[in-house]
Amino acid sequence: MKKLKYIIQLLRPAQWVKSVFVFLPLFFSGKLTDSDLWLPAVYAFFIFSFAASAIYCLNDIKDVESDRWHPRKCRRPVAARKVSVREAAVTMSVLATAALSTAFFLGSLTAMAIVGAYIVLNVLYCFKLKQIAILDVFIISMGFVLRLFLGGAMCGIELSPWIVCMTFLLALFLAFAKRRDDVVIYRDTGTVTRSNTLDYNLPFLNSTLGVIASVTIVCYIMYTISPEVTRRLDSSYVYITSVFVLAGIVRYLQQTTVHEKSGSPTEMLLHDRFIQLCILFWILTFVVLIYG
């Protein structure tokens, strides 16, 4: 039973919250009340979660030695020697196979191709591309965009350019904030947690975060007042949701630059009440506007 516990930890189920992005096409298309589309969306959620967990296994195998020097990553099952490299490799293979085969049989060849693209891109990331500063962050952000495409493919919903741009920008913001945490660890302990940590510094990351936050907010406001969006949602009050987006991004910037807590976006999402309330009110406002 204890071994199973560590295998589950290896999958990082808390990170599955990222797969919620597969539901966004369903939500913003106004088809959330279409019960026939819920099951494909749930399938998409688990398919991408399994694919992501397979990559986490590969990452833990590849970085096992460096993780043992990291103040937090040293507790991961492979780094802590709770799960062997062989057991992690078998788990990775099972998860990747399950994700690809399920995408094909329950979705389509397109869905399988999306999952396959995610796996291939992240295998390249684990072995080489993560060493290239800036490119590594863009690849992480592409993973969130692929989640959107899988949700759309499984539900038969065409994505708008707005939702793709907004998802990419937000993911880029979160990923650069995480890189800032690596630099803070290096500053405080002298430990290089990533091979490209020295290609970043705090002034660069602070200014980059400011730029991306600004672009994200402006892009979102443009989305809310777009004639296409107001016509599709049949509401001229979508701009009201900008308040919660602005508050959430500013709060995240505060936690990142003032309190230096950007190591795990998932943990911040699960524990920061302010951000949770911003997301809750943002969702509720959209529900009223779209489905009210």
Image: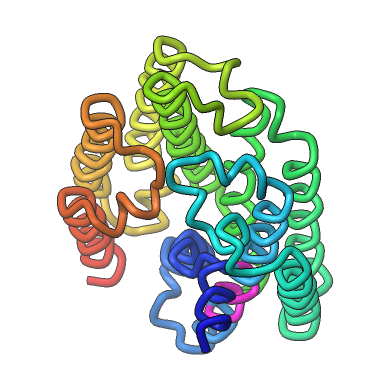
Task: Judge whether 151 appears above or below 212 on screen.
Answer: below
Q: Is residue 257 left or right of residue 122?
A: left
With respect to residue 279, does 8 lie above or below?
A: below
User: In the rendered image of this protein, does residue 102 appear above or below residue 115?
Assistant: below
Residue in view at x 74 percent, y 79 percent: 98
Name the residue: 47% across, 30% down.
Answer: 182
Residue 283 image point, x, y percent: 27, 61
Magenta highlight range: 42-48
Q: Position of residue 269 (x, y in %)?
A: 31, 54
Rendered position, 54 above or below 167: below
Nearest the viewer among 83 and 142 is: 83
Looking at the image, the residue that sits furthest to the top is 203
Visible in this render: residue 39? yes
Left or right side of 144 for 238: left
- Which quadrant holds the C terminus? bottom left
Q: Nearer the viewer, residue 49 or 3?
A: 3
Colour setting: rainbow
Q: Is residue 84 magenta?
A: no
Q: Residue at x 26, y 66 (%)?
A: 287
- The majority secondary structure of the magenta stretch comes to helix
Depth check: give the residue in front, 268 or 3. Answer: 3
Quarter where residue 213 is shown: top left
Q: How many marks?
A: 0
Q: Residue furthest front?
A: 81
Q: Residue at x 81, y 52 (%)?
A: 120
Q: Position of residue 91 (x, y in %)?
A: 72, 74
Residue 156: name its quadrant: bottom right
